[in-house]
Image (cartoon, rainbow, N blue to C red):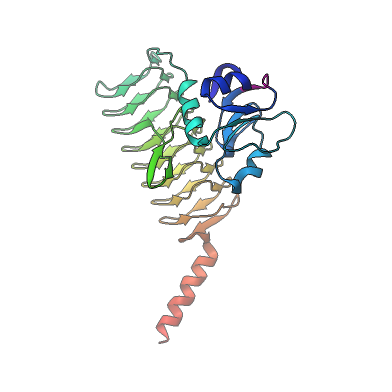
């Protein structure tokens, strides 16, 4: 999420009532999670295991629970509870402007669909009965969303401390590019601090779940009941057949195919075909199944 204007390190420290270390005039332009962080972003870290990865990331400002040495050009916001400070920052500096939805003149929205404020819908779209499009979502041209799908739900993202689960504020968006088709009963979560993206030309079957901050490339095909955990990346032209599950932070390379009911726990190279749970190259899985079948028949 980008701020409406840059904030200095000193301003952020005052806003959040925490200490800081570094140049008080250092500028921050937005917030992000560590896997998507860019120069100018604010990020948080609350475990020593991840200190170095965060310090060496592109982040300009790091919310942390103790003072540590950082490279030149970076600053620290210091507080015993970095997650809570980050969560509060996401809420405080997210846009509060409320504008009516912008809907293209040639788009058809069923009267039972719910379109929230700050939504943009392009031309030639077809929104079926019972669809919900939540705040700040962007839908391109010639998009079809079938009945009872929900676009822009909050992320399933929690910090667990002493048995209590605290939700991270979702201030990202869902962006659906041109010529996308979304089946009935699908759910697409908004990004936590960035965008969940469905690339142009992608076709989604019924009852598919897309988690927060997922990046779906162009011209992908997702069959019924596919589930994508948060931060998954599908490159262009990927095919996932029915009931495939993809674990968080996994990437599936361009043109890859994953057969039905597979569980993808590790990244899949481009152009490969995978199968099984955990998914491996389909040819190897078929060989294993054939071997097990032969050994069983010999008993």
Question: In which quarter of the view is residue 138 placed?
Answer: top left
Q: Main secondary structure of the magenta part?
A: loop
- Residue at 56 percent of width and 52 percent of height: 268
Quadrant that contains the C terminus: bottom left
Left or right position of 258 against 57: left
- Residue at 68 percent of width and 22 percent of height: 26
State the residue in front, 21 or 221. 21
- Residue at 55 percent of width and 27 percent of height: 18
Residues drawn in magenta:
24-28
Q: Mark yes or no: residue 192 visible.
A: no
Give x and y (percent) for residue 294.
45, 80
State the residue in front, 258 or 149. 149
State the residue in front, 42 or 263. 42
Give x and y (percent) for residue 110.
27, 22
Q: Is residue 143 magenta?
A: no
Q: Is residue 27 magenta?
A: yes
Give x and y (percent) for residue 11.
59, 18
- Position of residue 159 relative to residue 74, above or below, is below
Give x and y (percent) for residue 174.
45, 29
State the residue in front, 97 or 72. 72
- Position of residue 94 relative to residue 193, above or below, is above
Question: In which quarter of the view is residue 77 placed?
Answer: top right
Left or right position of 185 against 142: left
Q: Mark yes or no: residue 293 visible.
A: yes
Question: In which quarter of the view is residue 24 placed?
Answer: top right
């Amino acid at each position: 999420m980008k701020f409406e204007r840059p904030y200095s390190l000193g301003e952020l420290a005052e806003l959040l009532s925490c200490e800081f270390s570094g140049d008080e005039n250092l500028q921050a332009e937005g917030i992000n999670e560590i896997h998507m962080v860019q120069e100018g972003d604010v990020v948080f870290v609350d475990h020593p295991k991840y200190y170095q990865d965060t310090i060496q990331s592109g982040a300009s400002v790091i919310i942390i629970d103790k003072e540590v040495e950082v490279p030149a050009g970076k600053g620290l916001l210091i507080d015993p509870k970095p997650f809570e400070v980050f969560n509060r920052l996401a809420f405080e500096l997210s846009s509060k402007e409320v504008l009516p939805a912008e809907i293209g003149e040639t788009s058809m929205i069923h009267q039972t669909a719910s379109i929230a404020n700050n939504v943009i819908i392009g031309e030639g779209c077809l929104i079926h009965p019972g669809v919900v499009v939540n705040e700040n979502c962007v839908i391109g041209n010639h998009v079809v969303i079938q009945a009872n799908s929900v676009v822009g739900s909050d992320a399933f993202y929690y910090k667990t401390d002493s048995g209590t689960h605290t939700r991270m504020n979702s201030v990202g968006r869902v962006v659906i590019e041109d010529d996308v088709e979304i089946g009935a009963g699908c759910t697409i979560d908004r990004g936590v601090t960035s965008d969940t993206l469905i690339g142009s030309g992608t076709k989604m079957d019924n009852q598919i779940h897309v988690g927060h901050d997922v990046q779906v490339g162009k011209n992908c095909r997702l069959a019924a009941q596919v589930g994508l955990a948060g931060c998954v990346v599908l490159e262009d032209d990927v095919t996932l057949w029915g009931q495939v599950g993809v674990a968080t932070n996994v990437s599936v390379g361009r043109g890859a195919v994953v057969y039905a009911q597979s569980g993808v726990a590790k990244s899949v190279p481009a152009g490969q075909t995978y199968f099984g749970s955990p998914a491996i190259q389909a040819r190897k899985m078929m060989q294993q199944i054939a071997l097990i079948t032969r050994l069983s028949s010999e008993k």
